[in-house]
Image: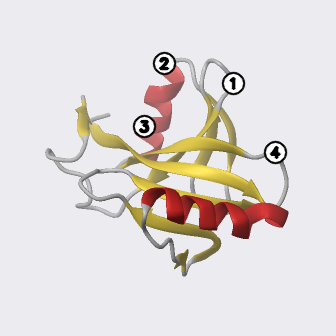
C-alpha cells in the first residue's frame, strides 16, 4: 500500500536509577534542554538544530541501557508489512499504539504513526 515514512527519532534508553545523570549528560552533549514530553513522562526530548531528527532520553522501567531508532509513518500497518518483507519481526504492540520490532540482526526499533499531513515530500520517503 502506498504510504510515507522516515527515520525520525534516536532514543537513548536509560535505567531509572541513572536517568537524571544521563539526561544531564545528553543535554550538555547537544547543548539543548530536553523537557519532559507531557503525554509520556518517561521521555525527555529535543529537536537538533538544522536536522530532521529528534533526540529522546527514555527512562526504562526494566531492561538494559541502549539506543534505538524510531521510524515514523502515515500508515502503520503498511510500514510494518514493508519492514517485515525486509526481514524485521514484530516483537510487541504497545499500549501507546506503536510497534516494537527487531531488525534482522535482532536490534530493537519502533514504528509509530504520525498525524495526517505530518509527512510529505520534503521530509519522508514515498513507498509505492
Pick the front one: 123 or 84: 123
- Tags 4 and 2 in contact by the CB under 8 Å rule? no
Numbered tag placed on residue 64 in the rendering: 4
| Mark 4 or 2, closer to the camera | 4
Q: Can you say which quadrant of the picture contains the N terminus?
A: top left
> Between marks 3 and 2, how big is the CA–CA gap?
11 Å
Q: Secondary structure at mark 4?
A: loop
> Between marks 4 and 1, how big is the CA–CA gap?
15 Å
Q: Secondary structure at mark 1?
A: loop
* Residue 100 screen position, x and y as percent: 63, 43
The residue lying at 48 percent from left, 52 percent from top is 112
> Between marks 4 and 2, how big is the CA–CA gap?
26 Å
- Whichever of callouts 3 and 2 sits on the residue coming sooner in the sequence is 3
* Residue 104 screen position, x and y as percent: 61, 18
Residue 77 in view in this figure: yes
* Residue beneath disc 1: 106
The residue lying at 73 percent from left, 55 percent from top is 14
Numbered tag placed on residue 79 in the rendering: 3
The residue lying at 84 percent from left, 65 percent from top is 17
| Mark 4 or 1, closer to the camera | 4
Amino acid at each position: 500500500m502506498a504510504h510515507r515514512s522516515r527515520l525520525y527519532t534516536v532514543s537513548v534508553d536509560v535505567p531509572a536509577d541513572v536517568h537524571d545523570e544521563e539526561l544531564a549528560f545528553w543535554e550538555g552533549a547537544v547543548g539543548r534542554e530536553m523537557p519532559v514530553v507531557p503525554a509520556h513522562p518517561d521521555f525527555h526530548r529535543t529537536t537538533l538544530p538544522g536536522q530532521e531528527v529528534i533526540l529522546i532520553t527514555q527512562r526504562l522501567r526494566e531492561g538494559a541501557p541502549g539506543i534505538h531508532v524510531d521510524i515514523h509513518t502515515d500508515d502503520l500497518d503498511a510500514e510494518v508489512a514493508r519492514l517485515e518483507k525486509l526481514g524485521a519481526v514484530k516483537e510487541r504492540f504497545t499500549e501507546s499504539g506503536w510497534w516494537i520490532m527487531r531488525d534482522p540482526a535482532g536490534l530493537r526499533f519502533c514504528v509509530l504513526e504520525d498525524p495526517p499531513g505530518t509527512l510529505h515530500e520534503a521530509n519522508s520517503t514515498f513507498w509505492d
